[in-house]
Image (spheres, rainbow, N blue to C red):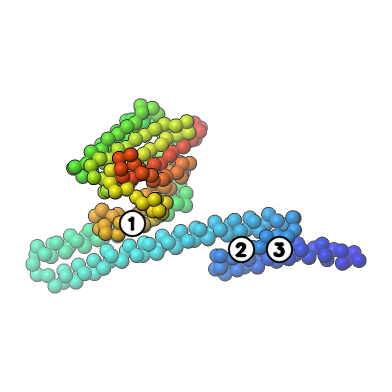
Amino acid sequence: MLGLLIYFNLRPLWRDLLAVRTTAEAFAEGNFHARSPLSKSRLFAPLPLAFNSMASSLERQMETRQALAHAVAHEIRTPIARLRFGLTMLEEEDDPEQWQRYHEGMERDIQELEQLVSASMDYTKLARGEFQLHWETVDLYDWFADLIDLVTPLKPAPLTLTLDCPHQQGRFDRKLLYIASRNLLLNAFKYANHSVHLSVQTEQYGLTICVDDDGPGIPEDDRERIFDPFLRLDRSRDRSTGGYGLGLSFVRLIAEHHGGHAEVQTSPLGGARFIITVHFPPQSAD
């Protein structure tokens, strides 16, 4: 009787452990969709929940890395094809001017490949959180005014660029926020018709940075996936304006690393309004 009592009490526990083990083995063999059934015993109830949470997180990371790898492979094909074409033309070309033109084109393709690899590595490093933010206290107006001066030479001549920023202090990683703000401004330069406006507001928790343009805007259905890496909503753009589709992904990652978020709305100017929020750290943070 004692043996039967122990058997019937331990059997549900053994079944729960066996189910988790079976799911773990399937996951280890490459079935990343495998999930453990919920435990029937209260003693082991947290175990399958914790395993399923871990499995979902790993599956998302694997999908992100696979998508990034496939996107990089796809992006590399174009400059490699142009390099192969340029090399063939160099071998057959006798005109010095044409030879020089093909040579310069191959140099640009090599630079494009280097920039693509560098951008992909930087994106992966930031996505993994492999470095610590370097917090600095800055005067907001002076810092964003310097940013405007740095990007003004990259602005198309017909566009006007304006700034609205308070004379207050902020605390953030200068390098990362420069990348995020610059990417938003360069993105606005591509689509604005006449004007781009950068506005900064201080909140109790941190900053809200808005970049407005009077371009065509972004359809509401695309406003979330526009932050996906290597996504181009406008497939007709060439390399001189299209970039690698990582700029807005960097923006979202940088905002999230500062405890904030990034989103896009309709601008009062009629185009797109990109918004990033940055949370200030405790004063004791380095």
Q: Which mark is residue 232?
A: 1
C-beta proximity under 8 Å, tags 3 and 1: no
Q: Earlier in the sequence, mark 1 or mark 2?
A: 2
Q: Which one is closest to the eye, mark 3 or mark 2?
A: 2
Residue 22 visible within the image? yes
Question: In the image, residue 147 lies at what x, y percent?
Answer: 30, 37
Q: Is residue 191 above or below residue 232?
A: above
Left or right? Give the position of 25 relative to 263: right
Q: Is residue 63 above or below residue 257?
A: below
Which residue type does callout 2 highlight? Arg
Question: In the image, residue 57 lies at what x, y percent?
Answer: 54, 56
Name the residue that disc number 2 marks. 35
Q: Residues within 10 Å of mark 2 (few under 14, many from 20)?
A: many
Point 61% across, 58% down: residue: 52
State which quadrant residue 100 falls in.
bottom left
Q: Earlier in the sequence, mark 3 or mark 2?
A: 3
Left or right? Give the position of 104 relative to 285: left
Dot 1: what SS? loop
Question: In the image, residue 154 lies at what x, y percent?
Answer: 23, 44
Task: Out of 242 and 160, give the one closest to the viewer.
Answer: 160
Point 28% across, 65% down: residue: 78
Q: CA distance from mark 3 to mark 1?
A: 46 Å
Q: Earlier in the sequence, mark 3 or mark 1?
A: 3
Point 46% across, 41% down: residue: 260
Q: Residues within 10 Å of mark 3 (few under 14, many from 20)?
A: some
Q: Which one is closest to the eye, mark 3 or mark 1?
A: 1
Name the residue that disc number 3 marks. 17
Q: CA distance from mark 1 to mark 2?
A: 34 Å
